[in-house]
Structures are given as C-alpha cells and as structure tokens.
Amino acid sequence: MFDEVAEALRGLVPRELGEVRTRAQRYGVKAWFGPVKPPRVHYEAQVIGAQHVEDAAVLALEVGFHAENASREANDEALAPLLASEKGWRRSLGTVAVAARVGDVGRPRSGRPRHGNGDRHPTDRLHHRARTIAPRSQLMISDSI
C-alpha cells in the first residue's frame, strides 16, 4: 500500500514546492524535498501501535511532518516557525492537527489521535500537509487515525 501512496504523492504535490522524494517501507512511507537521502525533517505516513492512540484497539495510522533530530534544541528550532505561523496553516488543516513532542529527545510530532478508517486516504493527507506546510517551513504537523 505505501508504495502506491508514494507514487500518487509524487503526482499530487505542486512542482513549485520542488521535487518530491519518497521511500516506502512495509509499514510506512517518508516523503521529503531536496537531497537524495531522507533528512531528519520529513513527511511520514506510518502504522503505529494502539498504545500511541487513545481508543485504538490494534493499530493506527499517523500522517504528518516529523522533525526527528538528535537534540531537543534542533527540533524546537525546526518547530518554532510553524508555531509562529499557526494561524495560517490552522485554517487549512483544522483542529485535528496539533504540534507536540514525543520521545526522549522531544521530537516534534503531533496529532489529535483518532482510530478507525479516517475520512481521507494517506496519500490525500500527506499531500494536504505538504501543500500547506512546505511553503511556510520545514516543520511537523500530523494526525493519527
């Protein structure tokens, strides 16, 4: 499934944002602009365990923009411009998208966790975030279903 998400995403993202690169794996797909190797700041759709999503029974799908640098400071620096421009992206992404830290080094990740099938395909959700967030900053915003 994630191979197909990657292929569709490359056709959906506006060219003015740059060349979209993707790397699909069994349980997810990363998407980014720029270098051949995926940077620590990228978009991602991935299957996650139910323990990360309130009311999920088995698995959930997280879709978002991740800053996964080694230090909390670098992640905070990546997140600052997005937080400063929240009013602009909030109109497009709605209340389901929430910027937040997870993990030992405070890697920004976000979401108002939901479970079930969701209302949009992962391709649509990744495309929407790339179109909304990329012009503003290289930051993370996501939601989970």
Image (cartoon, rainbow, N blue to C red):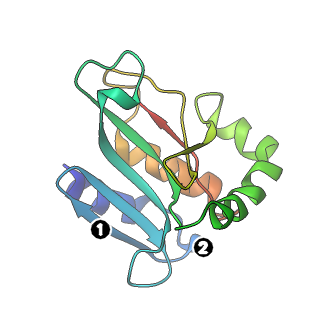
Residue 106 is labelled as none
Residue 16 is labelled as 2
Question: Does residue 77 appear to the left or right of 125 in the view shown?
Answer: right
Residue 23 is labelled as 1
Where residue 40 appears, as percent x and y from the top left, is 48, 69
Where residue 13 appears, as percent x and y from the top left, is 48, 62
Q: In front: 23, or 54?
A: 54
Secondary structure category for the residue under label 2: helix
Q: Amino acid at mark 2?
A: Glu
Question: Does residue 49 appear to the left or right of 75 in the view shown?
Answer: left
Question: Does residue 46 appear to the left or right of 132 in the view shown?
Answer: left
The answer to whether the residues at label 1 and label 2 have Cβ atoms under 8 Å apart is no
Q: Tell which residue pokes out farthest to the top in this image.
A: 55
| Residue positioned 29% across, 68% down in the render | 23
Label 2 crowding class (10 Å Cα cut-off): few <14, some 14-19, many 20+?
A: few
Looking at marks 1 and 2 on the same chain, the residue that comes earlier in the sequence is marked by 2
| Residue positioned 82% across, 51% down in the render | 84
- Identify whether 111 is placed above or below 34: above
Q: In front: 124, or 55?
A: 55
Secondary structure category for the residue under label 1: strand
